[in-house]
Structure formats: structure tokens, C-alpha cells
Image: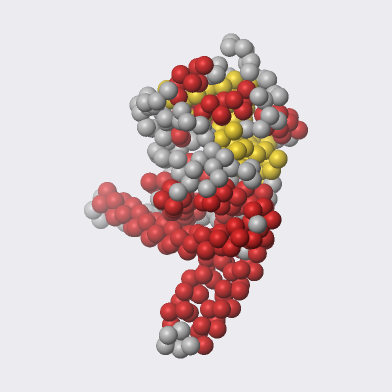
Amino acid sequence: MTDEGSSPLISVVIPVFNGARTLPRCFASLQASTFTDWEGILVDDGCTDASPDIARAAGFRVVATDRPHCGPAVARNVGARTARGDILLFLDADVAVQPDSLTRVAEVFRSDPGLAACFGSYDEAPADEGFLSQYKNLFHHYVHQSAREEASTFWSGCGAVRRDIFLALGGFDPSYTRPTIEDIELGYRLRRAGYRIRLEKRLQVKHMKRWTVRSLIQSDVLDRGILWTRLILATRTLPNDLNVQTGSRLSVAALYLLIFCLLLGFWWWPLWLAAAALAFLIAALNWPLYRFFARKRGWWFALRAWPWHWLYLGYSGLSFLIGLGQHLLSRRQATVVAASRSSPGEGVETTVAGGGEAVIQPSKEVL
């Protein structure tokens, strides 16, 4: 870590609300880094535990949001304003980097001066040994490691961006007050502005979160799936990448057709044969994933992960339907508001920027 007052190459920005359980390991991993030209900034979003004290003891600068519970988007923006480095490396408080992680970030940007941002993935060995934590982490690892290196979005769990570009774009959208898709939305804006983002597959961090059924479904449906659907519809951008690859979309459609055939099969049994064919199709589309599970944790783990993945496909489809409904309702409300504001006798012409809805459009001035 560089001395205070100098200008480091990388500013590590960690937003936190009560992260005392995982922060010591997060800081210890950073302090073991082979790269030394960096500074650490912890952004206190209203902590009531010892997180700020732990950060100061580790040599981190501690800054705070204007009010508690602003969310990680605002917290990261606060950290970016105080950062001195040319590169902002955003980390979650529940991840641990590898000794060469910061070196990889520096090398990526040095080797490609035209690159605006890069991000990595979780490694294949999460800290929590519970089945759901292993399944969720391995699924994330597989999706990122199987994706294209020329990325279409961004990930803030371990993601870096040039500070001048980040500030010029206005940072993260503060309307996202929970850890949701603020990083995805920033990635969309980076790409629309003509900047390049790279998925650096060698940049891997260890996740220390313990997943439960409730937290998994809440994250996938309420915090990601529905909001990502609305962002896709608002921007009219559906990349064939990460969780929205063509194979995943086909799997979701096939699963709902399978359910339809199973139900109607009680009235016309040949539909059960169609359901069996659809089940085979879903298995074939996702066989590389199931084989990956088996290779990493054995076939018994893969068999247990299979129904959880199908559940994921099911609620992904439900998330899309809910997001679509909210998008259409928002457009209708925008039309009504525009009509009510128009002068009597004038024609009403409503245009929604980007084909989207005002509630999720990024702020003009985020920082």
C-alpha cells in the first residue's frame, strides 16, 4: 500500500454496511498483495459495528456517506470522489483477492490503453462449505468463465474502471439503493458511450457469503432478474452474454413449454412425450454446466444441483414476466402523465427515451 499523500495507480474502494465478519479476511488478502502501488478506501454506509475501526487498523482511509443506508452505488461514488488513483478497483466487503489480483488489474490496463474497464469472477472454492453456497458460487464462476472476454456489462464484486471515464459518465446510478444491478447499468452506459469492457478470467476472488434459500431467490429475482429485465427493455439491449445467453433463454422457454405439456397431458397423453423431449432438450442445452458441477464436486453434487438449476430457470422466466409487466405499466403511466401536462387542444406525443421508463433511467448527475 502506498503512503498517504502520494498518487497510487489503483484505488481500492470497498462500500460496507456492517461487514465486520468478513472485512478482516478481505483486508488481509489485500495486504498480502504482491502489488504495492495502491491505496485502500472504505466507505462507511452507516455501520453500527466495528467495520470502520477494522479498516483504520488495516491502513485504509475511511469516508462516510451523507446519510446511512444510501446503498453501495452511492457509497462507491463517494469513494471514487476521494480516490487518488488513476484506476478504481471496486471490491465487495465479503471477497478476498489473490496475491496477484491487483497486479493483473494493473497489467490489463497497461497492456490495453484503450480499455475502459475490466472485471473478474468468483473462484471455484467459496469460503462457505454449505451446498447452496457451493452451488451458487460455482454457477457464477462457470457463467463468467464461459462468457466472452469482450464484455457487454460490468461487475462490481471485483471490477476496475479508469477513474476519469467513471467520473465523466457520472458513476453508478444512485437510484439503486440496494445492491442490485447498478453495476450492470453502468456497464450498459459504458458500452453505449463507445467504451470497451474486458472480462479478465484470470482475475478471481474468493466469496465469503453464506447463501440461504431466501437470500438466493431474493437476489436472483427481486434484486437482479426483474430489474435487469426492465433495464433490457428500457435500453432495448439484449446481449448474448453471461446469464442472458441464447442457450439460457431457450432453456427458460423450453421449461415453461414442458410445464404446459405436463399439465395438458392429463387431457391428451401424447403431450407427455413432448414434455419428455423438452426435458431432454433442457438437459442437452445445459449439459456443459452439469458436467462442470460433476468435475468440480462429483456427480452426487451435480444431481443435487440439477433441480436447483431448473428452479433458477423457472424463476428467471417469472422475473422476465414481472419485469415486462412493470415496464408496460410504467410506460402507460408515463403516457398518462404526459397527456395530463399537455395543453388543451394540443396533440400529445409521448416519447420515452431509449424506449424505457423514467424510474430506472440513470441520473444526469450521479456524483
Residue at image point 47% right, 74% down? 259
Quarter of the image for residue 51 reads: top left
Q: What colouring method underlies this structural image? A: secondary structure
Q: Is residue 70 visible?
A: yes
Q: Quadrant of the N terminus?
A: top right
Residue 232 in picture, x, y percent from top left: 50, 53
Percent position (x, y) of residue 7? Answer: 63, 16
Query: Relative to 92, is 270 above or below?
Result: below
Residue farthest toward the right in the current orientation of the protein: 111
Q: To which quarter of the image does residue 155 belong? A: top right
* For residue 66, above or below residue 2: below
Q: Is residue 227 visible?
A: no
Q: Say left or right for 76 vs 246.
A: left
Who is closer to the viewer here, 250 or 143?
A: 143
Q: Residue drawn 69% across and 46% down?
A: 149
Q: How many marks?
A: 0
Q: Is residue 27 left or right of residue 318?
A: right
297 shown above or below 98: below
**Picture residue at 41% right of the left edge, 40% below the top:** 178
Q: Looking at the image, which is closer to me, 234 or 92?
A: 92
Q: Nearer the viewer, residue 87 or 189?
A: 87
Measured from the top left, where is residue 120 in percent x and y?
Answer: 64, 40
Q: Position of residue 225 (x, y in %)?
A: 47, 53
Q: Residue at x 43, y 82 (%)?
A: 264
Q: Nearer the viewer, residue 232 or 105?
A: 105
